[in-house]
Amino acid sequence: MPIYPATAPMGELTIRTLAMPADANAAGDIFGGWVMAQMDLACGIRAAERARGRVVTAAVQEMAFALPVKIGDTLCVYTDISRVGRTSMTLKVETWAQRYLTHVMEKVTEATFVMVALDAEGKPTPVPAT
């Protein structure tokens, strides 16, 4: 069972994946771009479910890394839809690392993503009511 610090992740666990050597620099630190890509995938999954269709990333607002992700860590991305507009959604994203061969969970970064629902022609379309 994971061991969290004083605060637990906010949102729904959307992606869990393993940080591999191909995703790291020579020191064993996982590239920030790889972490951000996992966050983008998680937002795409969650927003597409809510929109019941195609979505794209419109913006990512401020992201800073508090701790590194290392080879062997399990990256856990949590998403929370904080706002639904006419054609867009705002998601709060928290990314945690379950440290290799432990149950210790540490928050490594967070960000806000804005996703836009698109129709079949690629034009913004209204997000359905719940």
Image (cartoon, grey):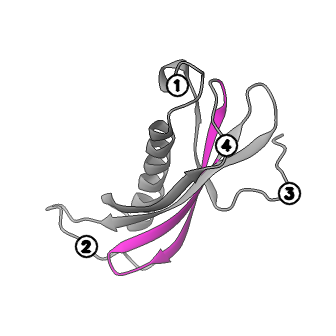
Distance, label 4 to label 2, CA atoms, is 38 Å
N-terminal of the pair, mark 3 or mark 1, is: 3
Circles 4 and 3, Cβ within 8 Å, touching? The answer is no
Q: Which mark is residue 24?
A: 1
Between 32 and 37, which is closer to the camera in this rendering? 32
Q: Give the residue type that dot 2 points to.
A: Thr
Marks 1 and 2 sit apart, C-alpha to C-alpha, by 38 Å
Q: Which quadrant would the N terminus be assigned to in this image?
A: top right
The CA span between labels 3 and 1 is: 29 Å
Residue that sits furthest to the front in the current view = 27
Horizontally, residue 125 falls left or right of residue 67, namely left
Asked if residue 78 is among those painted magenta in the image, a careful observer would answer yes
Type of amino acid at the residue the image marks with label 1 = Ala
The residues bearing labels 4 and 1 have C-alpha atoms spaced at a distance of 14 Å
The x and y percentages for residue 88 are 36, 73
The residues bearing labels 4 and 3 have C-alpha atoms spaced at a distance of 16 Å
- The residue sitting at 81% across, 42% down in the picture is 2
Q: CA distance from mark 2 to mark 3?
A: 40 Å
- Nearer the observer: mark 4 or 3; the answer is 4
Q: Earlier in the sequence, mark 4 or mark 1?
A: 1
Q: Main secondary structure of the magenta part?
A: strand
Residue type highlighted by circle 3: Ala
Q: Which residue is mark 4?
A: 67
| Boundaries of the magenta span | 72-95
The one of 2 and 70 positioned closer to us in this rendering? 70
Identify the residue under disc 3.
Answer: 6
Which of disc 2 and disc 4 is earlier in sequence? 4
Residue nearest the viewer, comparing 20 with 67: 67
76 relative to 111 in the view: left or right: right
Seen at 63% across and 43% down, the residue is: 76
Tell me residue 63's x, y (percent): 52, 56
User: Residue type at mark 4?
Assistant: Leu
